[in-house]
Structures are given as structure tokens and as C-alpha cells.
Amino acid sequence: MVDRISEILEQRHKPALLIGNGINQFNNYTSSSWAKLLGRLSSANGLKLSTLEMKEMSNTEFFDILDLAKSKDDRSNLQRQFCDLMSSWRPSDQHSRIVSWAQNHCLPIVTVNFDENLSRSVGAEYFVGERFTDWYPWSSYFSDRKIVDPKNSFAIWHAHGMMRYSRSIRLGLTHYMGAVQRARSWVYHGRESLRTLASREDGQWQGNKTWLDVLFFSPLMIFGFGFNKDESFLRWLFLERARLHKINPSWKVKTWFVDTPRTSSLHRKAFFEGLGMKYVAVADYNDIYENPAWLT
């Protein structure tokens, strides 16, 4: 089989990385599982659901149902509880291998994970970005230095929030809709919106100092991320990205979605291709996380 990962990583215009929780689960399938964390959260809050009932819910639906099940006098913060359950997570070899590759090539990483395994793996420092809010710390990042251009600098960005700010964690559908509402004005409204700039082609947009600039304008390799139906926020962002590329083809960049037989999304290949992505299937997780190309 042709090593598609090395083909992607060794090309001239190397991609930024969009990384999901698969990197935490590699060689450690039980302790870093979202499903296991949600199950523990459910037990701790007295919500008893059967395996079948859990299976029928998306993760976002489950979290919102759990929140609704709390009594009105219960002021416990489910987001903080979820972060506390991740407090024992630590980076492994694959974290440092992959993050070091990005660092060596001055490339950004966007992760949907809340934990800090990626930044801890290389001792990256935390930087508070412009117009900071702990609800949406989208301009804050981890790096080895303060950066100016998110697209052409090494930094680790947390798209769904970071565990040090529990209010930033996107878990329920309500949280995702809040993120869409915040990003939508940047895409659609005003002279600095992406829609305006796609036609006018001058000026800077409002998100140019955030991880959204990487997502919209950098070549991307996506892995460790199921891109399932409950990922409403990122699905919407990638749909908008494809629409913007149609308005302004000069903005179009290569994107690869990497899949394995165990998590096969082959039946959704048409969806990825409709978004302008290349669907790449590899034989095993080792082909991703232990690929020698990360050492180049």
C-alpha cells in the first residue's frame, strides 16, 4: 500500500494539522475515551441510561440531557467535572513526535481536544490572545514563542475550548450553537467579514488572529477525529469554508481527511469530497501515529 501519510507530510506545501481525541486513545484505548468519561459523568450525577439508550444519543445530546436531569438547586458545573476527569491524562510518544514535526516546520495545530497533552509533550508555553474571553479563548494558544501570523507559525489552538477554562468547553448542543452564533458574524456581517472579503479581496477579517484563520486558509490534514454528526460546529465551519472557496477559488487549499478501517467513514466519503477534501484511508492507526515521516 502506498504510504499516503508520508506523501502528504513530505510535500512542499506542508499542511497544518487538525487533531482529534484519537491521538490520546492510540495504544491507550480505555483511559482516554470520551464515551468512558461521559459514562463516569453520568454515574456521578445519578443519570442511569442503558447501553442502547446511550448509543442512540449523540455526545452533545447526552450532555444536554444530563444537564436537564439536574435538580434546579444543583449548581454543579458539568464542564468543570468533565475537565477534572481529564486531569490525570498525560502525553505519550505520539504526542511529542507529531507536535515536534509541526514545531520543526513552523506549522499550526488545531485540536478539538480540551486536554493539554499536545502542549505538554514539548513544554509549550501558554499565551493569552487579543480580546480574550474565557468563554471563547479563540485567540489564545500554546507555542514556543509569541506569534503574529497563525497560519505560518507553530502554535497549538483549542477549537472546542481548553480545560484550564471550564466555561470554554463545548460539550452540549447549546454550547455548539453558541460557538456558531459567535463565528457567524465574523463570516457574514460587516466590512471585515469573510463573505465581504471573498468578493472584495482586500483588508483583514475579524478572525485573523485566531485558530479560525488556520481552518479557513491553511492546507489541512485531519486525523484522530471522527467528524461525526454531532460535530455541528465544525461541520458548519467546513461548509462555510467550501462556500467561500466557491466564491473565491484563489482561497482554496488542499485538505485531507485520514481514516482507518476501525473508524471507517467510507459511507461519508461523498460528504468529505463535497467539502473539497480528499478522503485518505490507511490500514492501521500505526500508519498515522508511528509514521516515520513525522521524524523528517
Image (cartoon, helix red, strand yellow):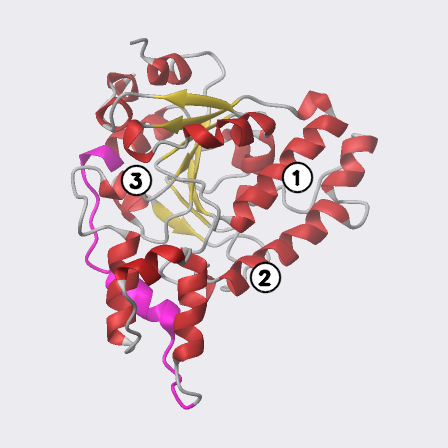
Q: Earlier in the sequence, mark 3 or mark 1?
A: 3
Q: Magenta segment: does it hold 61? A: no
The percent coordinates of residue 95 (x first, y second) are 26, 37
Q: Is residue 247 visible?
A: yes
What residue occupies the far front of the structure in this picture?
Answer: 52
Instruction: Classify 36 as above or below 144.
Output: below
Q: CA distance from mark 1 to mark 2?
A: 17 Å
Which three-letter amino acid code belongs to the residue tagged 1? Glu
Along the line of sight, the residue nearer the viewer: 77 or 11: 77
Q: Residue 22 got which mark?
A: 3
Q: Residue furthest top?
A: 2
Residue at the disc numbered 1? 240
- Count the numbered circles shown: 3
The residue type indicated by label 2 comes to: Gly
**From this viewpoint, is residue 149 visible?**
no
Q: Nearer the viewer, residue 223 or 53?
A: 53
Residue 109 percent location from the top left of the image: 42, 36
Q: Earlier in the sequence, mark 1 or mark 2?
A: 2
Dot 2 corresponds to which residue? 178
Say few, some or many: other residues with alpha carbon within 10 Å of mark 3 (under 14 / 14 to 19 / 20 or more). some
At mark 2, the secondary structure is helix
Give the residue at x 71% y 22%.
Answer: 249
Is residue 78 positioned above or below 133 on the image? below
Q: Earlier in the sequence, mark 3 or mark 2?
A: 3
CA distance for labels 3 and 2: 25 Å
Q: Amino acid at mark 3?
A: Gly
